[in-house]
Amino acid sequence: MANLLIVEDDDLLRDALVAQLQQAGHHTASAADGLAARGQLENARFDGVILDLGLPLLSGMDLLRWIRQRLLALPVLILTARDSIEDRVQGLNAGADDYLTKPFIMAELQARLEAMLRRSRLPAFGGSLEIPAGASRLRVDALLPRAWLDDEAMELTQREWSLLQLLVANAGQVVSREDVLTAWQSAPADGQGTGSNALEVYVHRLRRKLADSRLSIRNVRGLGYLLETPAS
């Protein structure tokens, strides 16, 4: 299940896409022009976008370029009547993850959308890492310093995010202090330093921020830290 934004100026098609994707189990929001879509992207988190190119107020191509400047890892599927090779190349080069032309078959759209969403969740594609936290879920962006507990954004420093990303990627396994310090080499300093005492401070901060979940960070003496999930 994903939270999707459908950007389409054709009212009938937009309503049909909303209905079909909700029936498939997704949450959806929609916009009829590029400016409205940009406003929604600035104020809410989405897992993917279905984007028409022929939009009023702000074109689909301009919106796509804006997305790639600010939401680097957000998957975008272009859905358009522009079917020339030049249009496909331009759309993909501008940062689209997939390109489907109208008219289309809904089953193919859904299959392409699911494939795009699966790819986006892989760390190699700059997606997000996700683990269950009891009745909640924790999601960590693999490229940007962002994370969510359920749909609530967590306030994290660069180093807190880097530590959390390592723990989530290795959930159920020990992450050594050396691994954390290596990951921190490219993270901006935020006043705490990178020594052993500083690392304990960051671990303590993350424990507090995960207090509403059933996740816990355990010190493994002489080895490092272990993120324990409800199933572990």
Image (tube, rainbow, N blue to C red):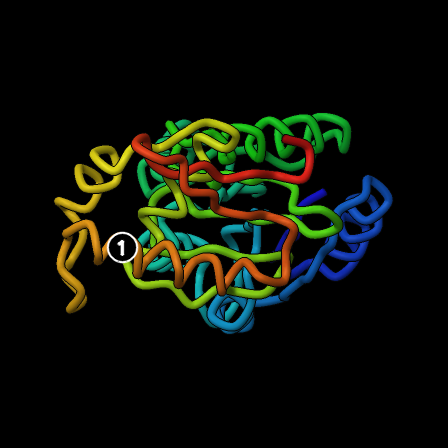
Q: Name, please, the residue furthest toward the front.
A: 221
Picture quarter containing residue 33?
bottom right
Residue 179 spot, x, y in % from top left: 24, 33
Q: Which of these two is toward me, 96 or 188?
A: 188
Residue 68 spot, x, y in % from top left: 34, 51
Q: Is residue 55 shown above or below 222? A: below
Q: Is residue 145 left or right of residue 150?
A: left
Secondary structure state at the residue bearing disc 1:
helix
- Mark 1: give few (<14), some (14-19) or many (20+) Cα within 10 Å: many
Quarter occupied by the C terminus: top right
Residue beneath the point at 33% across and 43% down:
94
Q: Is residue 181 shown above or below 8? A: above
Q: Which of these two is toward me, 207 or 1?
A: 207
What amino acid is labelled 1 in the image?
Answer: Arg
**Is residue 91 at least partly visible in the picture?**
no
Residue beneath the point at 57% across and 49% down:
138
Q: Is residue 62 shown above or below 131? A: below
Q: Which residue is mark 1?
A: 159
Q: Which of these two is toward me, 196 or 96?
A: 196
Residue 17 spot, x, y in % from top left: 76, 48
Residue beneath the point at 71% across and 56% down:
28
Residue beneath the point at 63% across and 34% down:
113
Picture quarter containing residue 114?
top right
Q: Is residue 160 left or right of residue 229?
A: left
Residue 109 spot, x, y in % from top left: 68, 32
**Is residue 33 at least partly visible in the picture?**
yes
Quarter occupied by the N terminus: top right
